[in-house]
Each structure stands twice: as structure tokens, then as C-alpha cells.
Amino acid sequence: MAAAAEQAPKIETKDMKTIFAERKALFDEVSGITGIPWIYLAAIDQYERTLTIANPKTRTRQPGLIGIYYSELEWAGFANPNSADTNPASIALFGGKGKDGSGDGVADRNSDLDALSTMASFLLQYGKGIDNLKLALWNYYHNARSVERIEQFIKIYDTYGRIDLHEHAFPLPLGAEYSYRSTWGASRGWGGHRIHEGSDIFAGYGVPVRSTCYCIVEIKGWNPYGGWRVGLRDLNNVYHYYAHLQGFEKTLQQGNVVKPGQVLGWVGSSGYGKPGTQGKFPPHLHFGLYRDNGKREWSFDPYPYLKKWEREERLRKEKKSGQGG
Ligand SMILES: [Zn+2]
């Protein structure tokens, strides 16, 4: 399937550890200078990175540690005759946003430190604290969803105190009996959408259903088609949708931060009726993934990701048991 090939997950390289460490050092540096909590900077940077992933053609910048993006015009000023201007004085004269954060006298939109400092100096105009940040973000994006996402990311970073939070887990325990295949886009399914927007993982009643990511619980409750369903938001601005649960883990609440493998509830057959309806189809977990580009949200095939997470989790387990003897 073409859609699956386009979405083929990338293999994480060892370098990611170094990248996360260097990126975190940049947040700490700018936080130290400006007094803006590093988790705010990290959350905005990560949100901007997800916008670039969703809009790769319009957001081009030299790849670096920082995902915050300014177009040439935004950076240099719309009336600036030199759209590649790097002189902080003339940029300021033409109302451009670009600032020199590294102190080398050059405001370079492709410099990580300059881009991050430019964002920080914008935020500082509004003062510190979360309410001021939200106001600043509203004025920056003019989009309530952007503000909400960044707040969610802040909460995830605040919970763990680090940015290396991109590990995933398979939604069911690997030791459980289950089966699934690629059914995304099929015209019929138990998802209740125009097309089948997910993969159905068949398993018995009561098999634990687990978080696939470091995520925040965005939605939890009853939905006429999905039954008892839960929706998680991860740091890639991807929405992980779980439907037809038998019930929820009792401490799970909307707004909770969860980690890969954490139990959310149990496999069931709820849905297709009034709250509590179950048994209209065999028990299974309907699992969907949706990407948000800041304006709209769309479903993509979770199957290659399920396969990847299953494989990665198995490898981690083997590694662990190997080390433990
Ligand atoms: Zn389904």
C-alpha cells in the first residue's frame, strides 16, 4: 500500500542520544540567560518540529538541533530589500524578528542559538509564568490548538525532566495472545468511520491495553462508535486513539501523563450504542493514529508503527534479559 510506504518509520540511530543532550544544553543555556523555564522552550521547539514534519515543503531550514522555524521574510522583515539579511540592526529597522543570540554580531536564521533566542525574546515581551506564555503563544500562532499542544508538551517534559521521551511500546503485552493485520482504509470495520481509520488487534476480554508512548491523556470516556475510548497525544503531535475498551484503569484521568507500557484499560467490545453497550462484535482493540499539522488532523496507517513498536519492545526485552543473565 502506497500510504504505508510513505509513512515507513525511520530507524532511530545512536546519534539521537547526542542530539537530545546537545539540544537540552541549548535550552538550559537560553533558559539561564532569559529566565524562561527550559520546558517552555523545549515544548515550543518540539511543537515547531512537528509542524515541519507535517509541512516539509514550506518549512525549509538547514537541519540543526532546533526545530523553531522562521521564513526568510519573517526573519529579515517583510519590507527588507535583502531577504537574506543577517545584520541585527537592519533586520530590526525593517521589523524583522531575527535576533543575534550567540553574540557573534550576526542574526542567522539557520543558527540554532539565534533561532531559539529570537523565540525567547518574543516570549519575554509578555513576561514570565504560564498565563503570560499562553498569551504570547496565542499572539504568535493565533490558533488555540497550537497553545493547547504546547501546554501538553510542557506537562510531559515537566513530568520527566528530560526530552529523550520518544520510546514506544506495543499497545498489548507482548506475552498476550493477539493477532492483527493491516486493515487501515478498508471500507468496513468496527471503527465507525467512513473508511476504517485504524488497525484492529484481536485479543480476549480483559487483556491489558497499554500506552504506546510518553503521552498525555487528551480524551477519555464514552463515544457512540468507539465505546469506552481513550485518546493520547504524543510529542510528535500524533493522536493515539484506542477504542472498544472493557474499562479504564481506575486512576487514569484526562490530563494524566503516561509512559510506554503503562496500563490504560482492558480489551473489550464496547461501542455501537448507548454508554455501556458491548458484545455487538468480537472483543478487540481498535487502534488509530492521527497527525495534526496545526490546522487539521488526518488518519494514517498505524500498522507499520505497530510492527515497529512490537519489534523494538521485543529487542529491548531480549537485551535486558541478556544483560541480567
Ligand atoms: Zn477498528
Image (cartoon, helix red, strand yellow):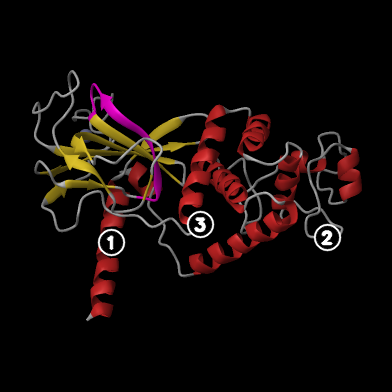
First in sequence, mark 1 or 3: give its number: 3
Towards the viewer: 35 or 177: 35
CB under 8 Å between callouts 2 and 3?
no
The quadrant the N terminus occupies is top left
Q: In which quarter of the image is ligand 1?
A: top left
Q: Which residue is drawn at 51% across and 41% down?
A: 54
Counting from the top left corner in percent of width and height, residue 180 is at 17, 46
**Residue topped by disc 1:** 313
Residue most toward the bottom?
A: 325
Amino acid type, mark 1: Glu
Alpha-carbon span between mark 1 and mark 2: 44 Å
Which label was assigned to residue 103?
2
What segment is highlighted magenta in the picture? 213-227
Within 8 Å: ligand 1 and the Cβ of disc 3?
A: no
Task: Identify which amino acid the numbered label 2 is placed on.
Answer: Gly
Question: In the picture provided, is 154 more to the left or to the right than 249?
Answer: right
